[in-house]
Amino acid sequence: MHTQAARLVRWKIQSLINMLRFSWVFYDLAGLACSAYLSHTRYFHLNPGPAIHFSRSLWCVIFVAFGIVLNYLWELYEPEILADAKQITTRLSFAGLTLGILIVLVNYVLFFPGVGRVILSSSVLGALGWELGWRSVRARHFRSRGRQKVLIAGNGELVDEICSLLASSNHYPYVVAAIASSDGSGQSSTDIPLINLSEVSRAVEENNVKHILMAPGDRPDGHTLDRLIDCMRLGVRFHDACTFYEQLTGRIPIRYVDHGWFLSQVQSIGEPLFRQAKRTADFLLALLGMVVTLPLGLIIALAIRLDSPGPVLFRQRRVGLNGRVFNLVKFRTMVVNAEKTGPVWAASKDLRVTRVGSVLRRLRLDELPQCWNILTGEMSFVGPRPERPEFVEVLRGEIPFYGRRHLVRPGLTGWAQVRFPYGASIEDARHKFEYDLYYVKNQSLVTDLLILGRTVSVVLGRRGSR
């Protein structure tokens, strides 16, 4: 029992590290705190104003909290963004502007005295300079010192995928030095050397390899196992190739897992405390959401009625927890009888979508009535998006283990929604399911909060809607 609990804790910590890049957050935390502290100290040292002023400690806490959250919302901890200088500059500018506006609202709307334009502007500018500086240093260090060397033991499609992924992306801190198999043969779409597993210790020393990935299906003999153990004495870390791929991409490579993987890896769905806490949070937030969005909902309802004939709300059968079918509620965004010929996936620039419906979809406002589905327990705020029964039947036959996504409640948003654009094909559904499976394995309240935060940036960027 203790071993299982420890394994669950490690999974949650690893999930948080993978999604939030904690070491990068620490750099920003230090810079934001120092900038706020020095700006406040310098101002009141040079201008000893009234005795009552905004506490320096409280100012630092508020400034750091807002800064970290906004950096996350603007995706400034994503490796893809950190590899693009233009993206870094643009997103940091927007984050700094948003931070200034929020601080002004806190200062003047809530009437906190003592934080004027000088402290605010110097804190923001100092933080922006620090954040841009360390990101530039990281990029330069990354290019000059190279990446950590990885050796892959085994062959097959997963090995080729990992090699292609690392070769085509300039933001991952790894490069494949060699591929080792039991007979030294195999196929590689790149010029990566192919060696025999018995030569692995020599290859590790010659190439200064830091990590060895064990591909599924390759079982070393006793002699080769001794050579691998020798590599451990050299300080090399061993990883399961599927887990390594999962940590790089944020999705589970479904083609390389089996029933044993599900039984050993997907544990959190059985935790009663987590289920109860999540359901309580869903209920309270859904109730609050329905009250807060009621005036906006009335305006949307009026716009729908004026734009096209038909009902305001649209109900559609979806598959939920444990495969149960329920009626999902949305604001109507299409013309009446849009599916006279049968269910079809929504397409880009779908002619069935009304003028008001197009705006609602881009802003995700058509999803607001789903607070009712969350309130009744048919959905959660975070989870795999519920699919239609007709599509589920097709996808069950095409995608292995597809029905396992129904082990958790479907969500208003999810890991697949913030990581993958809108899907309208079986192959897209396969990719989204790999993200959904990652969430099923790594779900926690912290993970849900991170996904909700990322959803805000996705909606602001109007990505993935149709």
Image: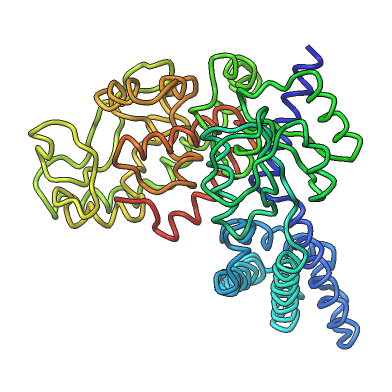
Q: Residue at x 83, y 37 (%)?
A: 201
Give the answer, above or below, for where 192 lies relative to 94. Answer: above
Q: Is residue 314 shown left or right of residue 17?
A: left
Relative depth, front residue between 33 and 392 = 392
Quadrant for the N terminus in the image: top right
Residue at left offset 55%, top offset 50%? 190
Q: Quadrant of residue 95?
A: bottom right
Q: Is residue 276 in view?
A: no
Which residue is drawn at the image coordinates 32% and 34% (left, top)? 426
Residue 288 point in image, percent of width and height: 48, 40
Residue 83 percent across, percent down from the top left? 61, 64
Q: Residue furthest bottom?
A: 46
Q: Is residue 140 above or below residue 266?
A: below
* Tally of numbered discs: 0
Which residue is at the front of the view, 395 or 69? 395
Residue situated furthest top in the rendering = 1
Picture quadrant of residue 146:
bottom right
Where does the image place residue 456, in percent across and percent down from the top left? Answer: 50, 53
Q: Is residue 158 left or right of residue 203?
A: left
The percent coordinates of residue 57 (x first, y second) are 84, 63
- Residue at 77% over, 75% down: 114
425 vs 201, nearest the viewer:
201
- Residue 80 visible? The answer is yes
Q: Relative to 164, is 331 on the left or the right?
A: left
**Residue 124 image-quadrant placement:** bottom right
Q: Nearer the viewer, residue 354 or 8?
A: 8
